[in-house]
Amino acid sequence: MAYIITEPCIDVKDGACTAACPVDCIYEGGRMFYIHPDECINCGLCLSICPVDAIAYDEEANEAQMAFIPVNRDYFGADVTGLGSPGGWDKSRTRNIDHPVVTSAPVREAAH
């Protein structure tokens, strides 16, 4: 695997991570972003720029973050988006759907 995006991204989607990613491996879902495990090169730029600390290295993830390892991986599979390994994000690959774990999470109110 590689880096993963976790719960703090849900309903925040700041997007700074997508601008920092040199290989465009961060894809936009409906309520959060997802890192493609096969496309991530482990550079850590996304981790260093995320304003809500939603990104973690999978091998250093705490227990709560570990639940998002399959969330990031499965997002690209046939059961969620069917994106597979497209080779990099662009607007045509944005989906307004999320992994079931994200869909079932309580909606976070926007900060004012």
Image (cartoon, rainbow, N blue to C red):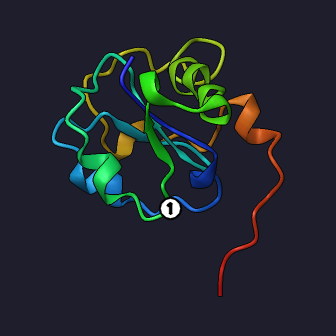
Q: Note whether 85 is above or below 36 in the view shown.
A: above
Q: Residue furthest left?
A: 22
Q: Position of residue 63 (x, y in %)?
A: 66, 29
Identify the residue shown where x is 76% and y is 40%: 103
The quadrant in which residue 19 appears is bottom left
User: Quadrant of the image for the C terminus?
Assistant: bottom right
Q: How many numbered circles are shown?
A: 1
The structure residue drawn at horizontal position 39% and vertical position 26%, both measured from the top left corner, is 36
- Which quarter of the figure is the N terminus placed in? top left
Whole-percent x, y for residue 5 in the image: 50, 40
Instruction: Give percent across and percent down for residue 23.
Output: 19, 35
Category of crowding for the residue at label 1, using alpha-carbon neighbours closer than 10 angstroms: few (below 14), some (14–19), many (at least 20) = few
| Image side of residue 79 versus residue 88, left or right | right
34 to the left or right of 1: right
- Determine whether 50 is above or below 47 in the image: below
> Residue 22's spot in the image, x, y percent?
16, 42
Is 95 situated left or right of 105 in this image?
left
Q: Secondary structure at mark 1?
A: loop
Q: Residue at left 66%, top 26%?
A: 67
| Residue topped by disc 1 | 52
Give the answer, above or below, for where 72 lies relative to 82.
Answer: below
Q: Is residue 18 above or below residue 71?
A: below
Q: Residue at 43%, 21% (x, y): give it.
A: 59
Three-letter amino acid code at the position of disc 1: Val
